[in-house]
Amino acid sequence: AFEPAAAPAAAAPPATVTGRVLLDAMGNFSPVMRQARGYSRPDGVCVVVGTCARGPWVDNSFGDLIYSFTPIRGDRQYFWEAFPSKDLHGSQLPSRTTYMFAYLDAHPDRPSLAEVFDDYLDLLPQYSGARGKEGQAARAEELEASRALFGFFPCYTGSPLPVAFDRILQVGDSSGLQSPLSFGGFGSLLRHLGRLDAGLDDALRADLVTKQDLGQLSPYLPSLSAMWMFQRAMSVRVGRSVPDADMINRVLAANFRTMARLGDGVMMPFLQDVVQFGGLLATLTAMSAFDPLLVPPLLLWVGPGPVVSFSAHLAALALYTLLNAVAPAITPLIEPNLDDRARFAWRRRLEAWRYGSGGDY
């Protein structure tokens, strides 16, 4: 016999969670972060497409971090990355991850991710990082893919994000601490974790939770802001006339060739998203000496606005490096005489000098 369904149980009342500080770790598309930024368009975007795949072309004896073999193509310069991976479906055959990416702005005329993925499949057989030991090419019809990736990472010049609300602090990608070159959000979070942990402990102990107080945990970092020059140098504006389609490749090759000559003390911090004044100045000086004809077209390519901005960040980087060097000598003279609020501010200033100069490397 038909029996009417039982009336649904009354919904439980919403739970109330209380806390003294909310940590916003909701990533690049956090609604809190978007509100704090006024829903503004990102200043830069990195589009990434790729696969984790098997096939006779797999050679996991090497990897690529940033590799380019094509000129500028359709308002974008493509770069490649490749490394060994593990098949997600349990296959014991060798598997390899290959990514293709490009630095763009958020112009509405940029291509769709589907178009970029078509370019990836078209160019993959030509990519040396996807070649077998006997020269086998990774053709689309032979890919045994266990995963396909396509997405984008936004970034903003106003980073790290200034704290906009009392009792709310962005951490991770939502804070904008990641490099506009590598977009390594997890790595940047780990790098700053000790600083944030100590700072939050100090803030809670002294009940310093206004946006002005917490804003000291998200300071200006010239080592991060200076990276925008490199991002601009490797991107192409929509509709721009390109007199030399290999311009970006030439700059990239000259940059890495120069850093290799200067040694691991310059190369390794850069590869780990740490910009230091000494290494950066040495690289810029050496590039001008080794390839002086490249500098004028590079400056024209980047444009006067980014060059002026970079010069200001470079000067700040030099200042922060000096202040970080003298900090250990002056701290014992200053900190013992401070109250809780002033001590909190002083410690945050020391951290800004240290991380803002790359001195934490």
Image (tube, rainbow, N blue to C red):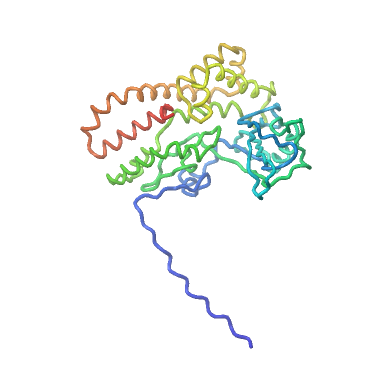
Residue 240, percent across and down?
66, 28
Q: Residue at x 50, y 42 (%)?
A: 173
85 with respect to 320 (left or right): right
297 with respect to 192 (left or right): right
Residue 135, percent across and down?
76, 30
112 with respect to 233 (left or right): right
Is residue 109 in view?
Answer: no
Q: Quadrant of residue 245?
A: top right
Please name whichever residue, 40 or 1, is drawn nearer the observer in this view of the structure: 1
Q: Quadrant of residue 45?
A: top right
Please name whichever residue, 274 or 136, is drawn nearer the observer in this view of the structure: 136
Residue 1, percent across and down?
64, 88
Please name whichever residue, 18 or 242, is drawn nearer the observer in this view of the structure: 18
Does residue 92 lie above or below 310 as drawn? below
Q: Residue furthest bottom?
A: 1
Which image quarter is the C terminus in?
top left
Q: Quadrant of residue 343?
A: top left
Does residue 337 lie above or below 245 as drawn? below
342 with respect to 108 (left or right): left
Is residue 250 in view?
Answer: yes
Please name whichever residue, 122 or 155, is drawn nearer the observer in this view of the structure: 122
Residue 184, percent across and down?
53, 37
Q: Residue at x 30, y 44 (%)?
A: 208
